[in-house]
Amino acid sequence: MRVCQLASGSKGNSLFVETGESTVLIDAGLSAREIERRLAFLGKRPQDLDALFVSHEHTDHIRGVRVLSCRHRIPVFVSYPTCREAGTALQGVPVTEFESGYSFAFRDLLVDPFPITHDACDPVGFTIESREGKVGIATDLGTATRLVADKLKSCRILVLESNHDEEMLLNGPYPWHLKQRIKSRHGHLSNTDAAALLAELLHSGLEGLFLAHLSEVNNDPRLAKAVAEDLLNGQNVCSPSLVIGDQYRASEVIELVP
């Protein structure tokens, strides 16, 4: 199993997951050309992709979906409400619709799209499970509900939002209404929120942790990393590889053996 954040941040998001029999993307929030370039970093072509799963309709998650899918005939899986809300952004795309809260099989994968709280039409997180283990993805959520924590248990790799430092957000340049949106139940998780969720998910089989969707204005990778490391260093359960997502380049790859 290989997992890599092709991009992570408010300007574009895309996650690469490869198992023994499947190669997929979760979201394609960059241009198709840029996604192709970052796939090449992994030794992959867009023609190698078996599917693209969409979490929600915001531009930083679907910008490249239509061109990438239509150009390379990549099937796209998206919830019914999100597909309708996305409109022309998915026009002409070979879509398979799923229902949030109901898992489905794809090739060697069991895909579980679960509802999250965000200011989108029908936003979901994902778990993707194969014989090699389980990957959990939860970004763009204002609060980690009990359902979110339950869905993300027993993962070998976690991708968790660590969007902002609370003091940087409070004292930063954003207008008050935008600060309130980010802090709300339908906004984004702070570094401390991410650590609190992670504390519930630690187990001996956790081998990889990606921190995702860091704000360029209201966060600092060093702060996000320090908060996560403080938690990890204070326990004796697991020692996952820690990777901080980046907006402008593909991340390190976490590779797990079966």
Image (cartoon, helix red, strand yellow):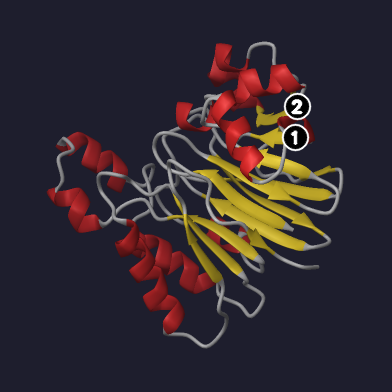
Quadrant position of the C terminus in the picture: bottom right
Q: Residue at x 76, y 27 (%)?
A: 75
Q: Residue at x 41, y 35 (%)?
A: 119
Residue 194 appears at what percent x and percent y? 42, 61
Q: Residue at x 81, y 49 (%)?
A: 109
Is the Cβ of the residue at disc 2 closer than 8 Å to that at disc 1?
Answer: yes
Could you tell which of marks 2 and 1 lies nearer the N-terminus?
Answer: 1
Q: Secondary structure at mark 1?
A: strand
Q: Residue at x 44, y 48 (%)?
A: 246
Relative to residue 38, is residue 21 depicted above or below? Answer: below
In the depicted view, which residue is nearer to us: 131 or 147? Answer: 131
- Which amino acid type corresponds to the residue marked 1 in the rendered image? Ala
Residue for badge 2:
74
- Which amino acid type corresponds to the residue marked 2 in the rendered image? Ile
Residue for badge 1:
51
Say few, some or many: other residues with alpha carbon within 10 Å of mark 1 (under 14 / 14 to 19 / 20 or more): some
In screen coordinates, is 196 left or right of 22?
Answer: left
Relative to residue 94, is residue 141 depicted above or below? Answer: below
Residue 258 visible, this angle: yes
Residue 23 appears at what percent x and percent y? 76, 43
| Distance (Cα) linking label 2 and label 1 | 6 Å
